[in-house]
Structures are given as structure tokens and as C-alpha cells.
Image (cartoon, coloured by chain):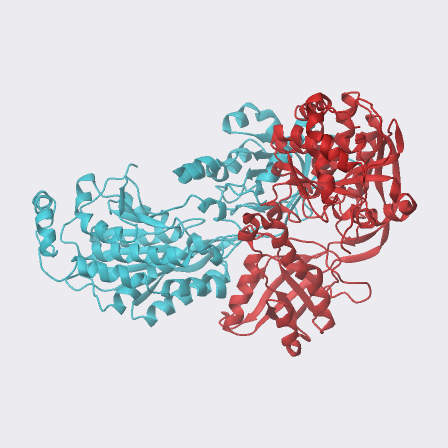
Chain colours: A cyan, B red
Amino acid sequence: MKSVSASKLTILASSLLIASAFASATAWAAPANDPATLAQIRDSAMKEDWAYERLADMTDLIGPRLSGSAGAAAAVEQVADAMRKIGAKVTLQPVKVPHWVRGEEKAQLVDYAGRPSGITQKVVLSALGGSGATPAAGLTAPVIVVRDFDELNARKAEVKGSIVLFDVPFDDEMAKGGQAGKAYGRGSNYRGNGPRVAQELGAVGALVRSVGGADFRLTHTGNTGLVDGKRIPAAAVTAEDAMLISRLLKRGAVKMHLTLTPQNLPDADSYNVIADFPGTDKPEEVVIVSGHLDSWDLATGAHDDGAGVAAAMAVIDTLKKLKLQPRRTIRVIAWMNEENGTRGGKGYFEVNKEKVEQHFAAIESDNGAGRPFGFMGSVRPSMVKYFAPLQKSLDQIGAGVFDRRDVAGGADIMPLERAGVPSFQPLVDFTNYFNYHHTAADTLDKVNPLDLKRQVAVMTSLTWYLANMDENIGRTVVPQ
Amino acid sequence: MKSVSASKLTILASSLLIASAFASATAWAAPANDPATLAQIRDSAMKEDWAYERLADMTDLIGPRLSGSAGAAAAVEQVADAMRKIGAKVTLQPVKVPHWVRGEEKAQLVDYAGRPSGITQKVVLSALGGSGATPAAGLTAPVIVVRDFDELNARKAEVKGSIVLFDVPFDDEMAKGGQAGKAYGRGSNYRGNGPRVAQELGAVGALVRSVGGADFRLTHTGNTGLVDGKRIPAAAVTAEDAMLISRLLKRGAVKMHLTLTPQNLPDADSYNVIADFPGTDKPEEVVIVSGHLDSWDLATGAHDDGAGVAAAMAVIDTLKKLKLQPRRTIRVIAWMNEENGTRGGKGYFEVNKEKVEQHFAAIESDNGAGRPFGFMGSVRPSMVKYFAPLQKSLDQIGAGVFDRRDVAGGADIMPLERAGVPSFQPLVDFTNYFNYHHTAADTLDKVNPLDLKRQVAVMTSLTWYLANMDENIGRTVVPQ
């Protein structure tokens, strides 16, 4: 029987009867998920600046942390040091990561109908991760614009020898209407797959319209699915520049001079930072709480995903300060290489394949540090009821929503989730997240310290709750 | 007596009696400012795309138009051609303009407390117009941050040999609260004067926090008051980077490596484009309607001030299409060099000094193409009442407000206004204007075509009204 206050017992009695069908046989009585402890954790998290300080260290002292960079290496050291300092058992798990380095990048529209003599138009762009390079002096080619893959295929003949621009507007109204993830997915499909498909049809370069809603001539980088040996140059142009090119094409042919000189270097050595807080009764069972340590190179990755890492780190800090030790082992992981390869997540799964059953649950925060409303989790529907006491506690800070999903985890815990490990993520307001993420504007000032405290409260309460639950929440089934 | 509909006569009778004290003796009765004509002008402007097409030509085909650049020269030709095509009498008035050319620009924080070995932090910046250059290889110096000139003076001893950052936040709440001009003035004071004052105290470089409210790591360039022979390098850093530097300074000393290689070239030849639509009865009396043709170099200057020029051009186009000829001469001027010298405005005044009395009024639109609510004008308070019929007509499109001011004109018509010429400007929503102006994001897509039509309706109605008024609205007194 889980320990709850007397007043809770009546309310929970019937659900616990049902629960017993799913629950593990073990039932013991340490002072774990009682409301008082949950309240103590929540209120303590709401008072602490520790996570924000860690985030400031990461973003202000180090800055960008793209896989393979000096920043990523420094971040591994910094996080490991901070976790050692609070008494966690730190392991660095080696992972080989892609090593892509941005080079020179510029583009000019050098010819178009109506162009006055001597005039060219500058196009603002940023190479996509994994992009190939133009010759050092650049290349000149006609630009064609398509709105989707159907149009690309219909115009195959024009693609050969051209620079293809996928001019797919980000649907900011969809994002503001509560469907930011869907709006992002629509655009990022072209970022991820457009350059590869264009290359297969003979394009000499590929451009995508930046996937994000703000109108401040900002490039949104991100990874693209080009593979070794045949990588055309690929870049994100700003929405403004995509629109300019589309307008000029209505007047006649447009020619671009494009220079992109990124390098795809051999895989580099890096690490997942793993910090354990061993459990009391069931130390062999693990609850992962995590964020990813690597970021894109244009900014300091405060929302994506410094905040997630800092909040995960703060789970152990918060509990240690309260002298609370969990039953199951809490494993904080700062994943490496979520952005362009997820080698950290894959590497962890590879090493722990035989121990999947020992993973009670996994949490990853990777939707930014917007105001949390609760949490998402990929438990089976019948398990939702066991989270009521946790929801009740978090409801005090407006974060009591449990949004059950078939898939809930971040990219790094996806292999675990696919293998059945119930996965969780804070449910945050990310209406405006895609206006910043992967851009030069993802900086510390964008993180509201109060919302980060709320996130720590959610992450710590949820982690603690999972690490101490009596009920076995079982496995989930993730659609493959 | 001005011609108004019978129903208006009663209402206006008393005010016209008072007006006669100021009005010129001339009173004549051509079909000019009758409500039907005003309605026809307004409604015709609201249907026309001509101004937007001119703005698209200017921004899409040419792009940036900084004084002395190929873009500025091409814009002179383009506007002159367009005005000739609609039958205006075009004159190019030569003006010598400053010729400042942006160079390489980059900055790194190369040392600060807590910096991991091998890490430097990138600072995003844009040189200010008139900035001097660092050595080609850059310079390295400590950075000090001040919040105002008092603090700068109090810390004189530290300034010598340092790079001074004026970290003055743009008050976006003030802007959104209807005081955008005041918010801008507060910040731009440091942009205009900060580098000069810092240089006088021995600084080796000067940085200002970008003057604008959006949080997308955008630089806001603009002119700075450095003078020939002693120009330190001066740049605008983004708000984000200013905050980063300020935060790092709380941890200890900060050292920056700064490279800015702009060039201050000899003055270049350029032109005001002047397009006259001669008046019938009083062709020697002139009503100027204008915008400035030059822009900053980071974007295509759609709001600042392509829209103003296009709207002014459309005044003649609208009237010609309606076969309406004004009594006084309407003079469209596309000013050169408002941004970094106002040589066009000064040059026009110099040449026309003896003819100031023949300038009945002057209009300049230079607050962007936000939704117009009416117009500002620097007539004496007693003259306001004569504009009631115009206000009544514009009120039909929500633009009937007459906001009388002591100073109302744009920078180019300021010399005329100071000499007593009543000056006008559309009264527009510029709440968000300073988030875009002088940045890379001031592009065509930011201009709402409907608002531009409204601006053409206001500009054309106002110009026509002034060009046909019976009342002499007299001179204004501008505080010196």
C-alpha cells in the first residue's frame, strides 16, 4: 500500500483495488509519496535558484554546445563537476558523435528580371547540420521554388542543376492555436528530407524556409538527412528571403550565387553525463530524468535544451537538500547529440539493452522552459489514476494536468520508450518555442526564472513519485 | 470662401469669421475641397495597388539604399522614371552625401571569469553608421558597461583604453503604451551621442545596446555622431549580447576582441528626386509631400522609408488618374540621406531659402506604414478648425484624427518647419515600428498592403486639401 494521508485513503481505496491487478506484489511502507513530502518537494523547488544558476553557467560561460565542439566538451565537464559537487555518482558514457562545423555562408541573388545594373540582393541563410559545401568561391545556379514534394516531383526536369527552395510557411496560427508541435512537424519535414530528395533529383543546392513563426529575419538551423559521400549544400533561408525569392520568380528567372563551406569531420569522442542517486529499497530499478546537453551552434541553447538539463540536474539537488532518498535509483542524464544523430540516446540503449526491464520510467524535458501545465506520459490508460496524488500536489502551482499519450518522451529516451519503458515529459507552453529554437535568439534571457522553477517542481515531484510508487505502472506500447 | 457643401456652411460660418483674421485676402471658388472630391480621392486610393507596386520595385528589385551606394543611385533612377511615366515634371537636385560602407564585423568575448579553457563567446553586432574601424586584425580591450552618461562620467578612469557598452534597455512597455517615440528617443540618445562622449574620455571602442523591443537577437544600426579624423569603432550589439556582457561583468572582468572594418569614404554625388504637379491658380505656391529614399544597409527599408516614398509618389498618381489638378503645385520629393546626414533636406532648404514663403505646407511620412489614424500637423492651434472637412472624409477609413503638434514634420522638412512652414505627417500606429526599423527585418512582407492604401488615402487627401485651401494657414512657430 502506498503511504498516503488518512484523508486520501478513502478516495483512493477503490482505485487501489483495481490497481492491485497491475501492481507488483511488493508493498512496503517507507514515507514516500505522502502528500506532505510531495508538497515539501514542490515548495522547495519553487524557492530555489540552483537550476537557473546551472543554466546560466552552461549558457553564459560556455555558450553553444554542438556535438564535437569545444563547447560540448566543456559542458560535459561542467555538468559532471556540478553533479559530483552535490554528491551524485557520476559516470561519463563514451559516445561517438557526428562532427559538423559551420563555415562561411552567404548568398546573393545575382540575376533576376528587373534587376538594375550593378545590383544584387543579399539572402540571409544558415547552413543546415550535415550540409555539404559549395566550392570555396561558391556556385551560381538558377533557383526554383516548390511548395511541397508533389510539386518537386512534377517539376523534376527543372530540378537538375538548380538550387531548390522549399518555400513552406510556418503556420504560426496553428502554433498559437495550441498545435505548435504539428506546425513544426509540417515544416521540419522539408528541412529533414527536402535536401536529400532534391539531391536525388539532381539539384546542386537545397534551401528550406526557416521553420519558425517570428518575422525578424531569423534563420532556423537544424539537421538535414544528407548522408556521407554525397552531400549537396543545404541551408535555411529566413522567411523574408524565401518570400523575396518567390516574389522575384513571379517576375522571371532568378539566379543565386551561393557559398557554404561547412565541414563534415570524422566522428568525435563525446559523452553522456550520467549522475546516479542510488535508491534505498530498489536500487537496481532506475528512473531516468534527463535533458540533452548538446545544442545548435547559432545560440547558447537556453531553451533547447539547457533548461531541460538544468531542471533534470536540479532533481537530485532538490532531494539532497531535503535529505530525501528515493526507493528506486534516480538517474540524471545529460544526453549528448540529440540534435544531429541522437547518438547519446542510442548508445545508452545499446549498452542497457539487457536491462530495459530495470528501467521503471524515463523522463526527458525537451520542449523548452515555457510555463509547465503538468506532464505527459506514455503509460497505458488504466495507469493514469495512480498519478492522482501527484497531480493534486502539482495543481497547487497550476501544473496538475496529466496528458496521457501513446508517445510522450523526448528523442533520447525514444529507444527505451519503444522498448516499453513508460516515458514522461513536462507539459509546457511551447506556443512560441519554435520562434526561438535552433535560432541565434535561443539565449538565457528568454527563460523565465519562475517557469524554470515550476519545471524543476514538476520534474522533481514526478521523478520522486515514480521512484517511490508502489504500483508497477507496467510497460507501454509505442506504435512502431 | 472655401467651397464646402451647403450643410457644412452653417457649421463653419463662425470659425471662418475668426479665421479671416489670419486668412489671406484671396478667396476663390474652384471645385476643390468639396466633400465629393475628397471622398473620390479617398475611395480611389483605397482601391489602388500602385503605391505597393512601387514599394515592391524599390525593395525587391533594388533592396538597401544607403547613401552613396549603388542601391541609392538605382533608386533615384527608378523613382524618377516612375514619376516621369505618370507625367510629373521631374528634377534631380544634386546633393553631396556621406559615403560610409560597412565592412567585416565580428566580436568575441575572449576572457571572463569562469571561462572554460578554449571557449570564447560570440557577440552579435553591427557597426553604426559613421563608425571608425579597428585594425584589420581587430583589437582586444576590456569592456565596461554603463547605464547612462552620469555613470560614464563617474567611471572616467576606467574608460580610457576600454570598450564602453551603453546597456540601456529599450522600454518596450513604454512603446506598447503609446509612447514609442519617447522610448526610441531615450535609447537613440546613447546611439547618437554615446560613442562620441566615450571617445572623448579615451575609450578605444563604443557599443550601444540595440534600440528596439523585439527579442530575436537583432542588431539595430543607425547613425552615430562621430566626426571625421577621430572615429573610434562603434557598433550596436543585440539586447541579448548586451545582457550577456552585463551578466558576465558581475562575475569579473570581461575582455573583448572586436573587429570592425567600415570605411568612411569621400562624400558621394547623389540626388533628391523632385516631381512636380503644377498648380492651376497658384502654381508658385508649393505643397511638398515626401518620404526619404535612402535606407539603412541591413535590410530593404520597406517601412523606413520606402513606404513613405511610395505613398508620396502615389499622391500624384491618384490625382492624375482622377484627372484632378490642384490649385497649388504639389511637389513630391524623395529625399536623399535622411539616415546619416539629412543632406537632402538641408540642401533643398539651402537652394529654396528665399522661397520659403512660397511653401504653403510640407508633408513627410517617416514613421512607417502602420495603420494610419489621421495626421499630425504643426499649425497654430487656431488653424485646426479649418481641417474639419478633411477629417470628416478621412474618418470614414478610421483616419480622421488631427493631432496638432508644435513639431510634426519628418527630419527632411525640419529646416522648412523651423523657418515657419506648417508641416504634416501621417499619424500611424508605430507601436512595433522600432522593433524593425534599422534592422535586417525591415522588409516588404512587414508592410500591410491595406495600411499602405490607407496611408495613400491620408497623404493624397491631405495634400490635395492643403493645395486647395482658401484659408491661409499661416506660419507655425517651432521651438528652436
Residue A123 x %, y %? 65, 42
Left or right: residue A410 versus residue A151 is: left
Of B163 and B343, the residue lying toward us: B343
Residue B201 x %, y %? 71, 73
Left or right: residue B406 versus residue A418 is: right
Q: Quadrant of the N terminus of chain A?
A: bottom left
Q: Is residue B420 above or below residue A30?
A: above
Left or right: residue B223 versus residue A35 is: right
Q: Is residue A171 above or below residue B9?
A: below
- Taking the spot 76% from the left edge, 53% from the top edge, the residue there is B101
Q: Quadrant of the C terminus of chain A?
A: top left
Of B12 and B100, the residue lying toward us: B12
Quadrant in the picture for residue A313: bottom left
Of B289 and B219, the residue lying toward us: B289
Residue A75 x %, y %? 44, 63
- State the residue lying farthest toward the right: B354
Q: Is residue A335 visible?
A: no
Quadrant in the picture for residue A39: bottom left
Of A3 and A19, the residue lying toward us: A3
Q: Is residue A71 visible?
A: yes
- State the residue lying farthest toward the bottom: B157
